[in-house]
Each structure stands twice: as C-alpha cells, then as structure tokens.
Amino acid sequence: MKPTDFAYYLTDFLSKHLPGTVGLSPNTIMSYRDTFSLFLEFCSEHKKIKLEKLSLGNLNRKLVEEYLEWLEKTRKCITSTRNVRLAALHSFCRYLQMEFPDYIHRAQQILSIPMKRTKKISIEYITLNAMKFLLEKPDKMTKKGRKDIVLLSLLYDSGARVQELADLKVGDIRIASPSTVKLTGKGSKSRIVPLMKPMAELLKQYLKENNLTEPYAFDYPLFSNRSKGKLTRAGIAYIVKKYAGKAIEDAPGLFPDKLSPHCFRHSKAIHLLQSGVNLVYIRDFLGHVDIQTTEIYARIDGEMKRKALEKNNNNVVSDKLPEWQNNKGLINWLRGLEK
C-alpha cells in the first residue's frame, strides 16, 4: 500500500529532520512522538479517520483545535502539557512549509493557534535541615538502603535533573581529587560539576560495594534496577516519594505536602545562593542557558529574607554554615566557569 503524504512527511520529520537537521535530543524527539501518537489516536477513535487514509489535506486548524480540546477535556492534560503538544505541531508545520510549499497557507493557520497562558509555577524547595533529615531516612544497614542514600545525595549535591541522573554511567564519575561528575543535560550538552568530599566518599564506597571499579564497568549505568538495566525517571521518582513520605510523616512541618525529585535541584540552588555563591556561577552549575532562568531563585531568596525580617527585627546570625560556604575549592571552581 502506498503511504499517504502525511505518513511520508511525518516519518521524515521524526526520523531525519529532528535528529539530523535540528539536532534535538532523543528525549525531546520522544516527546514529539508522543504528541503524534496521541494525535493519531484522536483522529482514528474520535474523528473516525482511517490512519491509512490520513493525509495532509485532513490536517487543518479546526482539527488541531479539536485535538487540543480533546487533550484538555478528555485526557485531562494540564495547560503546560497542552502547550507542549501544540509546540510539536507548530514545529511540524514549520517543517512542512519548507518541504511542501503547497501547504504554506494551512500551515500558517495552524501556526497562528496561540499558546495558552499558564499559571505561575511555584518553586518547590526545602531547607538545609530538612534535606539533612530526609537523607537520614534510608537504612544504612542494608545494601538497598545504602544505594538509595547515594542516589538521593547525588541528586542533591550535583543539582542534577532527574534524566541527567538516570543517564549517568560509571565513567562519568571522577573519585580522585578534585572529585567531579559529568552531567549530560538538555540538547545533549555536558557539564562538569564538582562533588563535596562526603559525596565523593559515598560514591567510592558505592562503586566498590557494587563491583563497579573495574575498567569493564566504565559504560555501566551508575544506578540500575533489578533487571540490571538503567534506572528510569519513574524509578528515581519512586525512591524519592518513598523516603519523602517517611520524612513528611515524621516531621510534617519541615516539608511541603508533596516532594518531587526536582525539589532537590531547586533546594540546591537556593542553598548555594544563601551561602553567598554568585547567581552567574549557579547558572553554570545548574546548566541553565539563560541567566533569567536562574534569577527565579534570587527572587525566592529575597522573598524569604523579607518574611524573616518581618517576623524578627533583630539580627539573626547562624553559627552553622553549609559545608560549601567554607569550601574554597568549590568557590574557585565556580569562579573559573566564567573564564
């Protein structure tokens, strides 16, 4: 059976244009594929369009708007998810304008569908004492508990995104001084992040206990599941939820009602800022492209300070400082990122 023009161009878009011409990461391409999988499901089951007959002639503004409405009302997608799906369709239409000039008018009609305004996202973070309390929850007497301690500690100490942690290989860890971890983030961009001495020691013990110190283990996943495969985002989220639940139950006043893996990254950024690290260095530490993304932490920190001053007019001086405040090696490393 001869493929339709929609099938031809969609296949070329996903398999050649996005990875080859645009250079998107596999995770982003997977998100685009999810968008079109749902779109095909919508066309087949709700619009009764046979997929083998679906053509570019069917793809118009009305169909896309109905698809977006279906996502929100039937699939219960939140506004931000709806916007992600629309962004993928916009990208496909921009591609079609170049590859299929006859489609320019319809493509521009779809491109004119606006993104919906989303509610301001609240940044979830916890205090340094709360983080220490949480990291004490895994059972140090069991191998599983020790693995979870290392995973949670590294998630916090490196400020890694969940996917960055899931993608880590043994070879990305440098135990020798200065200890570092290589994180590969959005757009397959890598950065080297320094590790605190306690974190490096935890990793050293973990690698030794799990027989990951030999050269042949260089490309093994740093954290694996029961099947010896790479631990997934969902697997990491499960571990975080497990210990967060215990911590919240024992000390509800220290934590928000829900605690996601990304909270570790936000908390690290806030703690670095509170200990006097320049925002520019934090931007590079977190792997942000734009300083404006990092500035949200400065606004949060400013709000925290304002509330503290309103509660207490006296000067408040802490006699206990985070470890990195006195760590000249980390401060010098962060400063060196600008050079």
Image: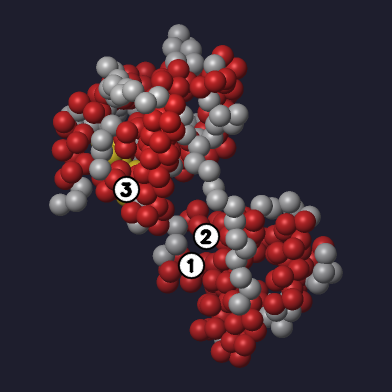
**Badge 2 is on which residue?**
29
Locate residue 301 relative to residue 103 in the image: left or right.
Answer: left
Whether tag 2 and tag 1 are in contact, CB under 8 A, the answer is yes
**Badge 1 is on which residue?**
18
Q: Position of residue 122 (x, y in %)?
A: 53, 43
Real-space Cα separation, disc 1 to disc 3, in angstroms: 27 Å
Locate residue 202 relative to residue 334 in the image: left or right.
Answer: right
Specify whether residue 191 is in view. no
Indicate the secondary structure of the residue bearing disc 2.
helix
* Sequence-first disc among 2 and 1: 1
Quick one: label 1, few (<14), some, or many (20+) residues within 10 Å?
Answer: many
Identify which residue is drawn at 59% across, 52% down.
Answer: 119
Identify which residue is drawn at 41% across, 20% down.
Answer: 129
Q: Residue furthest top?
A: 141
Q: Position of residue 288 (x, y in %)?
A: 36, 51
Q: Position of residue 26 (x, y in %)?
A: 48, 56
Q: Disc 2 marks which amino acid? A: Ile
* Sequence-first disc among 1 and 3: 1
* Sequence-first disc among 2 and 3: 2
Locate residue 330 relative to residue 54 in the image: left or right.
Answer: left
Q: Disc 3 marks which amino acid? A: Arg
Indicate the secondary structure of the residue bearing disc 3.
helix
